[in-house]
Image (cartoon, rainbow, N blue to C red):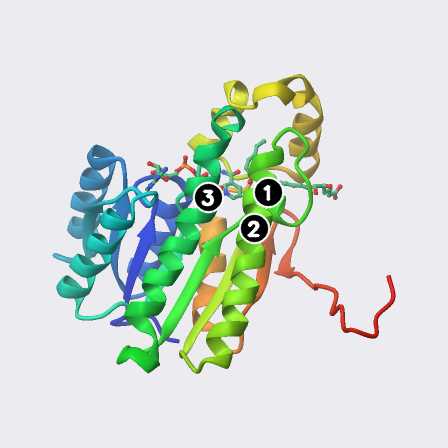
Amino acid sequence: MALDGKTAIVTGAAMGIGKAITEILLKNGAKVAVLDVNKVEGENLVKDLNKEYGADRALFLSCNVESDEEFKAAFQKAAEAFGAIDILCNNAGILNEEKWQDMISINLAGVIRGTYLALEHMRKTNGGGGGVIVNIASMAGLGPLLTCPVYTATKHGVIGFTRAVAAASAASNYGIRVNALCPSFVGTELFTTIEHKLGQFAHLKGAANQLVEKLGVLNTPEVAECILELVTDETKNGEAFMVRTEMKGYVPFPSLSSTDKP
Ligand SMILES: NC(=O)C1=CN([C@@H]2O[C@H](COP(=O)(O)OP(=O)(O)OC[C@H]3O[C@@H](n4cnc5c(N)ncnc54)[C@H](O)[C@@H]3O)[C@@H](O)[C@H]2O)C=CC1
Ligand SMILES: CCCCCC(=O)CC\C=C/C=C/C=C/[C@@H](O)[C@@H](O)CCCC(=O)O
């Protein structure tokens, strides 16, 4: 899918990885609806982006991905402003093991909520033009991050959901691909403020720091680059793409056919 003239919705787009994804989509010719709970950051960002990329290329919509009503209204407004939606990036997420129910509600249920809304708007069997969804998971969706058991669970959930809904979309001729992006550590506010958000396993933070030392820290444009790959390569559906400082690529999963033995 070429991006020129396409329209996108990015959640949690006021800062961090979502902001970088918004910028790379704009640079490549798309229009972007910036959804976020942070109105001040979101509105300021959109003002700057429209100065840089042209009037009305970006649109801020206040939206908490935990709210069905707000999410639905944001999709409606974006569709009215842009004509149609071609791309959804479910990026909004938090890390706070002390507020673990909120993490499930935002990181996993928010992705499901956004995906189901996008299927309604975009699926060819409902008058839509098809499109692509990218869910921001994490390397913690592929293996355990021991200081963060619930964060790990939400990201494993995002990958499982992505793979299943991708297969269901293909089998239903929706014309919508769904893929997941799995970055290792990225230097955003989420990463720099974890100190007081690790809950009962905060005493294990030394182990997490060792993993950071080993894996290094990505910057947000490096992560955003990978979005282009997942959006534009029409052969990819139900994939998880891992990005680390020293390597990136599609993650192989076991096939688990009925004849396989453990
Ligand atoms: N920073 C990292 O090391 C990594 C982050 N990720 C994932 O990338 C995504 C983005 O994370 P970062 O940019 O690092 O975080 P960040 O904290 O820098 O930015 C998150 C953005 O999401 C917004 N947001 C939070 N809750 C929201 C809600 N309920 N509804 C709408 N917007 C909401 C915030 O206002 C903020 O603008 C998350 O899903 C995170 O789990 C994945 C791997 C590594
Ligand atoms: C504590 C800050 C979390 C920031 C948010 C993230 O999503 C970052 C996740 C980044 C990396 C997670 C890696 C987990 C890896 C484990 O499964 C480990 O077992 C893999 C070890 C890889 C290796 O040793 O090469």
Q: In the picture, residue 175 is in which quadrant? A: bottom left
What is the CA distance from the residue labelled 1 to the residue labelled 2? 6 Å
**Residue labelled with disc 3:** 107
**Residue labelled with disc 2:** 157
Element under disc 2: helix
Q: Is residue 66 found left or right of 223 in the rendered image? A: left
- Label 3 or label 1, whichever comes before in sequence order: 3
Question: Which percent across, then down, holds residue 188?
Answer: 45, 35
> Vertical placement of 141 versus 226: above or below?
above
Of residues 171 and 8, the one drawn nearer to the viewer in this rendering: 171
> What label does residue 153 carry, if any?
1
Q: Is label 3 in contact with label 2 (beta carbons under 8 Å)?
A: yes
Q: Is residue 159 found left or right of 5 in the rendered image? A: right
Q: Residue at x 28, y 69 (%)?
A: 121
What is the CA distance from the residue labelled 3 to the residue labelled 2? 9 Å
> Vertical placement of 209 versus 68: above or below?
above
> What label does residue 169 carry, if any?
none
Q: Is residue 220 found left or right of 82 in the rendered image? A: right
Q: Quadrant of the C terminus?
A: bottom right
Q: For the residue with label 1, is its CB less than 8 Å from the closest atom of ligand 2? A: no
